[in-house]
Image (cartoon, rainbow, N blue to C red):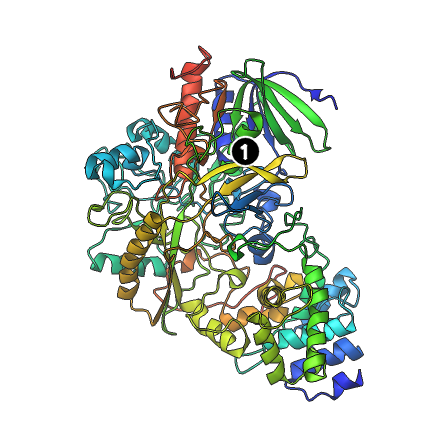
């Protein structure tokens, strides 16, 4: 079937989540004619997040209305290179988005930066602990960009998002009771930190008694009214507790739909096309230059969109798959260790403690905000001496009370039956008296943990699914167990009557049935050498210079913090390079 | 029919359910009828609307309907802590769910080949929720008939609990559908029906939310972010604005 050919544009963007919206804004500001292709539906605060219909746990948290439609797009998963991968048939462990706003519409709003050493992790560990400290088979790398280079973009992204938080230092001057481990900042958060819930306040108090350094989470949920640099207005968050999995009815949680799209709608050189499923990036005969993309439109017709610049801005694993389907970059081979696309795939290494309090202590866990909470960074990144501990990585710990709901969220003390009068008694006794806390650990990269195309399973359009080969490794379990042990001390100091601990045992396999996080990273990583990375430091493909790949797929390994802040900063950093360097002289921005 | 009705009943709610469902005898007094009846008359919805009159199942036949009621009545029983799954309208909720894309498996990746794998890789059966119920109920009833000479719904509460416990522990061999899978489906949907917004046909009169203290769709805690460990003063509201 001959594809319908659309008129040429300057740039085509694949996917309209955070990075698609950021690049659309930046490139239209530079005068480019931009088309963004989003495979899902059009979505916005109204009607998708309108009160009261949005306050519906069954529809959103349980049936997962705003998440990806697995019947059309999924992955296969296996634990080891010799296993058969099976499809991820039901959403559970991770829940990517679909539709306008992508995962940025249904995210929680924890809006961090990054620990500077995590951008040069291999060099940092080798310098501080010696080369032998990094275990055999661990493939951690440097990103090729420094925190100092990204700082202005972290700062601007916070202003676009309307992020609430309390800095410790601004321009090297102490300004308040923020996180003493924070990377240097050039400015305050645009909004003061949100209020603390009772649970978070108690966690902070206990942590302080133990000599730790609690701080309030940087939250892309507004602590007051706000107008961002694009002129978009946000209202104050009212702690309704319906953030993660929902569009925010209060216009308080940052999303591409709320914080960027209204400005783009005023731009005549921007067009957003929905229900457009991109099949591949098209290359010319040299395979060194992209000519645009081919997609299926809402009616299922094949359409070619020619463009000078292709921005791949879908969710992490969709980006990797699109590169593999398009023949951009050499696929990674775990046996030889050669090739790059699919290499260094990682996840988030989450452990959870639930503390149950007496019947006179009401924690009211349905009150909350997705980005809100109190955390400690004493065991994150390299804020503590890893030498005697013998593992790479770390983990922030926090109470992030985001709104615990009854169908999906009720915890009961260990040993409680799952049904019957004893279960009912337990949920009645515990629901209003529970505090949940997480160690949101980093996950390192390994030679035999990677992404490639599945040999068996296909999507409804006849293209192979992406295959994840992933399992937990001793290094990461060791880290999680250590930090969870530290968090356990905080939990005990809070004085509960019972404590449940969920952390992995050595040898535990990746369990796709249990929600962990949607923080998948790597597979199209940035770096300093085309032999070991897919992208250069500007997120530009080493192989096809007019293809830039956004998102957490660029992270060389997992980080302790939530990824969205780094994703947004990297997108602005890449956009700046495109605007200031690439458009003047299209070609590789770094010579290989 | 007579066999069902002659069984010794353990609770009023269960007896009410079976009379409504199997014999289809209209019952006048049902909790929460004021609000839902108002809704029904306003919109002209048929008499099958929750609470207004006995619900006639669309997906489940009479035997299956008896099973569902008898099972959810044990999973979340009416007891000293308040109403249970029957009072909350859980059977109606489940029946209504069976007509959603979810129950047809439309939200899942359902392309073959279907292969067994390690449990950590998740659900790999070709069965969708409608199949799991249809096959699971028939298989459990066959098991109960063989073991106890009665259908599940006709068993006394202690024996029903025993059977449910064995299903949960995957200790009963069922044809076609693994016992644990069937049980997990039933328990998940029962909890959903007990705790969902009443707009879905369950949590009638918000009994599930009242049991645990969840305020439903209030969704504005600006003045209650930190109450220093004290209770929140208001009861629940639903999407349609029902209060108690």
Tell whether A153 sits left or right of B190: left
Q: How many tags in the picture?
A: 1
Residue A361 higher or lower than B159, as above or below:
above
Q: Could you say whether the residue bearing mark 1 is in a helix, strand or loop?
A: helix
- Report the quarter where the N terminus of chain A lies: top right
Nearer to the camera, B201 or A296: A296
Point 41% across, 32% down: residue: A337
Please state the chain letter of the residue tagged with numbered disc 1 in the rendered image: A
Quadrant for the C terminus of chain A in the image? top left
Q: Quadrant of residue A133?
A: top left
Residue A462 lies left or right of residue A233; in this view the side is: right
Residue A164: horizontal and vertical position, in percent?
A: 37, 43
- Residue B134 x/y as whole percent: 73, 65
Residue placed furthest toward the top:
A585
Residue A583 coordinates in the image, percent (x, y): 46, 14
Residue closest to the eye, A52 or A381: A381
Across and down, in percent, residue A94 comes to 50, 48
| Residue A489 visible (yes or no) | yes
Q: Quarter-wise, where is residue B172 in the image?
A: bottom right
Horizontal side, residue A71 vs residue B235: left or right:
right
- Residue under pointer 1: A321
Q: Quadrant of residue B238?
A: bottom right
Residue that appears at 60% across and 29% down: A37
Residue A19 vertical placement versus A561 (above, below):
above
Structural crowding at the residue carrying mark 1, measured as other residues with C-alpha within 10 Å and reported as few (<14), some (14–19) or many (≥20): many
Instruction: Name above or below for residue A498 compared with residue A453.
Output: below
Q: Is residue B75 visible?
A: no
């Amino acid at each position: 079937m001959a594809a319908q050919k659309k008129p040429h544009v300057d740039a085509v963007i694949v996917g309209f989540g955070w990075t698609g919206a950021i690049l659309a804004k930046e490139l239209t500001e530079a005068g480019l004619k931009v088309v963004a292709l989003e495979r899902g539906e059009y979505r916005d605060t109204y009607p998708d997040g309108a009160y009261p219909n949005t306050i519906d746990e069954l529809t959103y948290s349980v049936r997962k209305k705003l998440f990806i439609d697995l019947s059309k797009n999924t992955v296969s998963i296996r634990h080891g290179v010799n296993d058969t991968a099976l499809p991820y048939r039901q959403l559970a462990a991770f829940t990517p988005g679909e539709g306008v706003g992508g995962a940025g519409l249904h995210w929680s709003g924890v809006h961090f930066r990054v620990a500077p050493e995590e951008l040069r992790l291999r060099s940092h560990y080798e310098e501080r602990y010696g080369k032998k400290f990094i275990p055999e088979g661990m493939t951690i790398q440097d990103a090729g960009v420094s925190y100092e280079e990204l700082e202005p973009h972290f700062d601007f992204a916070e202003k676009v998002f309307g992020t609430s938080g309390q800095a410790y230092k601004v321009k090297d001057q102490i300004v308040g009771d923020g996180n003493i481990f924070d990377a240097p900042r050039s400015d305050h958060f645009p909004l003061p930190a949100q209020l603390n819930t009772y649970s978070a306040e108690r966690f902070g108090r206990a942590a302080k008694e133990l000599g730790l350094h609690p701080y309030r989470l940087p939250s892309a949920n507004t602590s007051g009214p706000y107008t961002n640099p694009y002129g978009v207005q946000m209202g104050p968050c009212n702690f309704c507790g319906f953030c993660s999995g929902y569009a925010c009815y209060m216009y308080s949680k940052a999303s591409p739909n709320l914080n960027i799209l209204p400005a783009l709608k005023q731009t005549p050189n921007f067009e957003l096309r929905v229900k457009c499923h991109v099949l591949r990036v098209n290359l010319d005969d040299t395979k060194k230059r992209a000519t645009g993309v081919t997609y299926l439109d809402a009616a299922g017709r094949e359409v070619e969109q020619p463009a000078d610049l292709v921005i791949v801005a879908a969710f992490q694993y969709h980006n990797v798959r699109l590169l593999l389907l398009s023949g951009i970059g050499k696929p990674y081979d775990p046996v030889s260790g050669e090739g790059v696309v699919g290499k260094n795939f990682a996840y988030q290494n989450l452990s959870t403690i639930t503390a149950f309090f007496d019947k006179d202590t009401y924690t009211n866990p349905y009150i909350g905000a997705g980005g809100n909470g109190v955390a400690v960074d004493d065991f994150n990144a390299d804020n503590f001496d890893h030498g005697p501990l013998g593992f790479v990585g770390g983990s922030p710990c926090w109470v992030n009370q985001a709104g615990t709901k009854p169908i999906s969220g009720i915890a009961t003390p260990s040993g409680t039956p799952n049904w019957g009068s004893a279960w009912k008694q337990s949920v009645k006794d515990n629901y209003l008296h529970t505090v949940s806390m997480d160690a949101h650990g980093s996950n390192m990269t390994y030679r035999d943990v990677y992404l490639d195309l599945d040999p068996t399973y296909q999507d409804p359009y006849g293209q192979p699914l992406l295959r994840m080969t992933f399992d937990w490794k001793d290094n990461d379990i060791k880290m999680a167990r250590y930090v969870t042990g530290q968090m356990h001390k905080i939990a005990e100091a809070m004085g509960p009557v019972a404590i449940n601990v969920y952390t992995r045992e050595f040898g535990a396999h990746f369990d796709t049935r249990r929600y962990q996080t949607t923080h998948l990273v790597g597979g199209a990583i940035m770096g300093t050498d085309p032999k070991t990375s897919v992208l250069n430091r500007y997120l530009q493909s080493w192989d096809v210079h007019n293809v830039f790949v956004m998102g957490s797929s660029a992270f060389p390994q997992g980080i302790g913090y939530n990824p969205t802040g780094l994703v947004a900063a990297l997108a602005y950093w890449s956009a700046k390079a495109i605007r200031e360097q690439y458009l003047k002289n299209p070609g590789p921005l770094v010579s290989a | 029919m007579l066999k069902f009705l002659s069984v010794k009943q353990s609770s009023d709610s269960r007896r009410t359910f079976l009379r409504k469902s199997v014999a289809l005898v209209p019952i006048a007094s049902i909790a929460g009828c004021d609000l839902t009846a108002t809704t029904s008359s306003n919109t002209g919805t048929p008499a099958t609307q929750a609470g207004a009159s006995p619900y006639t199942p669309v997906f489940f036949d009479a035997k299956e309907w008896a099973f569902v009621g008898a099972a959810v009545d044990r999973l979340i029983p009416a007891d000293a802590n308040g109403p249970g799954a029957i009072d909350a309208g859980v059977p109606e909720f489940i029946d209504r769910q069976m007509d959603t894309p979810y129950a047809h498996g439309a939200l899942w990746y359902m392309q073959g080949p279907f292969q067994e794998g390690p449990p950590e890789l998740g659900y790999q059966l070709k069965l969708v929720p409608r199949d799991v119920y249809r096959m699971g109920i028939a298989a459990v009833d066959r098991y109960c008939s063989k073991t106890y000479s009665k259908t599940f719904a006709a068993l006394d509460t202690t024996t029903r609990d025993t059977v449910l416990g064995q299903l949960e522990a995957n200790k009963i061999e069922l044809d076609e559908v693994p016992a644990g899978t069937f049980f997990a489906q039933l328990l998940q949907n029962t909890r959903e029906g007990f705790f969902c917004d009443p707009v879905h046909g369950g949590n009638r009169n918000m009994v599930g939310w009242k049991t645990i203290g969840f305020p439903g769709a209030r969704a504005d805690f600006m003045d209650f972010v930190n109450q220093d460990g004290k209770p929140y003063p208001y009861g629940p509201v639903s999407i349609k604005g029902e209060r108690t």
